Amino acid sequence: MRVVSGAGKALMMVFWAIVGLNLTTPFAHPFASLIGLAAVLVLVLHSLELLLFRGRLSALPRPRMARLQVLIFGVFHLLTLPAKAVAEVKVAEVQHA
């Protein structure tokens, strides 16, 4: 699983680098718009992940950093969270229910 999350994080960094490059020096006509649209869609999806996993992220020792990483890497960061934190969150969710 570490290989998948590491490769996914690397691809996301390449994606955000392309988006940043597109913002500074726009690419040819159809590609600039498509890259901008893809960036907006990825940000919306990662924001939804933040909402869905807010309980799991707030149980971590550094929740702000975890939220930032989810905003950048999405589910690839969620795959790297320790299993102990996941179990603690599940217990806390059961107790609140």
Image (cartoon, rainbow, N blue to C red):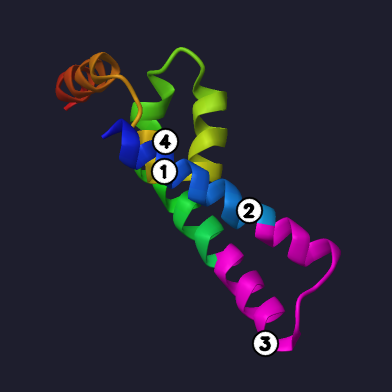
Question: What span is in magenta?
Answer: 18-40
Q: Residues within 10 Å of mark 2 (few under 14, many from 20)?
A: some
Asked whether, in this view, residue 72 is left or right of residue 55, the answer is right
- The mark that comes first in sequence, 1 or 2, is 1
Quadrant, the C terminus: top left
For residue 25: magenta?
Answer: yes
Q: Disc 1 residue type?
A: Ala
Q: Which residue is mark 4?
A: 77
On the question of residue 53 being in view, the answer is no
Instruction: Residue at 74% x, 56% y: name it.
Output: 20
Task: Look at the numbered discs 1 and 2 and tell me whether their residues touch, using CB distance below 8 Å.
Answer: no
- The mark that comes first in sequence, 3 or 4, is 3
Classify 82 as above or below 5: above
Q: Secondary structure at mark 4?
A: helix
Q: Which residue is mark 3?
A: 30
Q: Residues within 10 Å of mark 4 (few under 14, many from 20)?
A: some
Q: Which residue is mark 2?
A: 16
Of badges 1 and 2, the one in the foreground is 1
Q: Position of residue 12 (x, y in %)?
A: 52, 50
Instruction: Residue at 19% x, 18% y: name it.
Output: 87
Q: CA distance from mark 3 to mark 4?
A: 31 Å
Q: Residues within 10 Å of mark 1 (few under 14, many from 20)?
A: few
Of badges 4 and 1, the one in the foreground is 1
Q: Which residue is mark 1?
A: 7
Q: Secondary structure at mark 3?
A: helix
Q: Residues within 10 Å of mark 3 (few under 14, many from 20)?
A: few
Q: Secondary structure at mark 1?
A: helix
